[in-house]
Amino acid sequence: MSPVSSLTTAVHQRLADALAAARPEAADADPLLRPSDRADLQANGMLALAKRLKGNPRELAGQVVERVNNGDVIEEIEVSGPGFLNITLTDRAIISTLAARAADERLGVPLVEHPRTMIVEYSQPNVAKEMHVGHLRSTVIGDALARILGFRGEHVIRRNHVGDWGTQFGMLIQYLLEHPHELDHEGGEGGDAAMSRLNHLYRASRQVFDADPEFKERARARVVELQSGDPETLALWQRIVDESKIYFNAIYRRMDVLLTDDDLVGESAYNDDLATLAEELESSGVAVRSAGALCVFFDDVRGADGEQVPLIVRKADGGFGYAATDLAAVRQRVGTLGAETMLYVVDARQALHFRMVFETAGRAGWLPEGVAHHLPFGTVLGKDGRPFKTRSGEVVRLASLLDEAVERAAEVVREKDRDDRLSAAEVAERAEQVGIGAVKYADLSTSRSRDYVFDLDRMVSLSGDTSVYLQYAYARIQSILRRAGDTARASAHPELPLAPAERALGLHLDSFAETLDAVAETYEPHKLAGYLYTLATQYSAFYENCPVLAAEDPATVANRLFLCELTARTLRLGMSLLGIHTPERL
Ligand code: ARG
């Protein structure tokens, strides 16, 4: 199926041709088409162009109108104001374009012409630690980007850069060595059981570590064993990692994110590269020794005292840290995996770290300009406007946050199911889809860089910009389509005149592909969320104003069912690209 050219593209082409005919010297000018309230589209480009050509914008606009080929697409084009063009499309063009979209499984969304190898790094929890609210945004945003870019045909490589290396493992491993039954699977096999074993291991070893100086010494020595690859130490480390994977995977399955063990390449994976990496940086002069450590300096990175603050590649004690593994990851992703674009979905507070890592990798010749992007995001806040904490002031566990959302969603689902048609199992399944969807959507509908308040009442509300609202819109359309059954079938009728609400809905349906372009250009999934919300509100305006099954004649019924069906498919596909389910019934 060939990609469908949108109505905007078709009009753009006609205006560009008319412009080139009117003023050959302006053949490259952009007519700047935008949706408009007055007509269907407005072109604002004549103003800037007239200025450039030192002409009168209204006159130029008039010349374009004279030369434009209306074809089947443009119903009316007129000059307005200081030199805008107002354009009204034909009803025929709207429905025929949508019919072409409906005939394509991808709804006419083209595959990119030149797929790039793109790394999307997200989630990145730490081994042996519980995931908390801070991991929510990275996981949800990263997953939506991976889905959207993948759908466009990019070659997406997901990376979960887990924190699975470092000095804290000395303590855990040493304790495990001295208490070999600590991780025995008596408490069960699930993610919760795994996490409670790890929590126990962590607390127990911490207690001994703090109380017993000799244990502390043994724990320190254990770190050295780990870093030098002692097999027994590595085996115990692996057990801790495996236990964490059980927990991570349980969370990922529940949240319905794409991450699997194949995507998990943690800090430890780069261990063997670090010594050579440091040597290369030193011999090329990118890094220098300072107080025993191997450091990279930046003119514009200074502390409060005006002294430069370096990126530390190797500590004075010979150990490697967070910066070294990130440098190795960059080198491998570009050099070995052939990454052409790398997205790091990480908290805004790490902005300086990434600036220094990318700059260093650039100086070393490992990272071409424009490949790596840190995509920072804002903080999840409590209702008091401060970073979200539990009542006792602790960080909020991701699992309990999901539990709470699902509980609230179950109430909503039960309330809606007044005549008790759903079984307990059905309520539970829908509550998961609604509750998890609510949490994801609240996150994805906020622009990435902004903070937002975690407010479950608002998130599961049936009205307003929520996933539940969109899920209900979808389920309601499905119920209409079921009611139509075999008596009336959806089919496009381009010969019919359209009501204003049908035109508005139709034009918005046609801009789905362009919305995905915009998301891919800026890496901002909230643009897709906003598009879907507008789609649902336009659909409800259509539904209020245009009877579907009770329309005056069979052709109109069929054409309106066609609009219903395409709306449902667009909602479903759009939501799935955000990683959110659309149940058939709610
Ligand atoms: N594990 C880290 C943390 O929890 C985040 C890792 C971010 N990614 C990276 N390539 N440094 O803070």
Image (cartoon, helix red, strand yellow):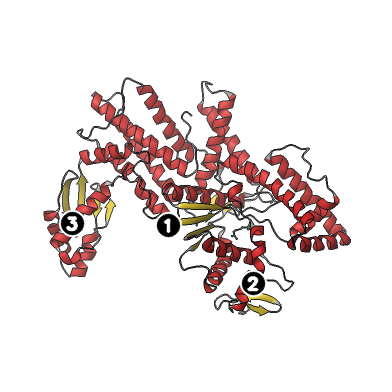
Q: Report the residue at 36% width, 45% height from top.
A: 109
The local secondary structure at tag 3 comes to helix
The circle drawn on residue 17 is 3
The image position of residue 393, as x and y in percent, is 69, 51
Mark 2, residues whose alpha carbon is within 10 Å: few (<14), some, or many (≥20)? many
Image position of 153 with respect to 254: above or below: below
Looking at marks 2 and 3 on the same chain, the residue that comes earlier in the sequence is marked by 3
Residue that badge 1 annotates: 522
Q: Is residue 452 left or right of residue 80?
A: right
Looking at marks 3 and 1 on the same chain, the residue that comes earlier in the sequence is marked by 3
Observer-side mark, 2 or 3, equals: 2
Q: Nearer the viewer, residue 565 or 469?
A: 565
Image quadrant occupied by the N terminus: top left
Looking at marks 1 and 2 on the same chain, the residue that comes earlier in the sequence is marked by 2
Q: Are marks 1 and 2 in contact (CB under 8 Å)?
A: no
The image position of residue 188, as x and y in percent, is 74, 36
Image position of 15 with respect to 95: above or below: below
Q: Nearer the viewer, residue 133 or 326?
A: 326
Image quarter for ligand 1 equals bottom right
Q: Looking at numbered disc 1 in the image, what kind of residue is underneath it?
A: Thr
Which quadrant of the structure image shows residue 29?
bottom left
Does the Cβ of the disc 1 residue fall within 8 Å of ligand 1?
A: no
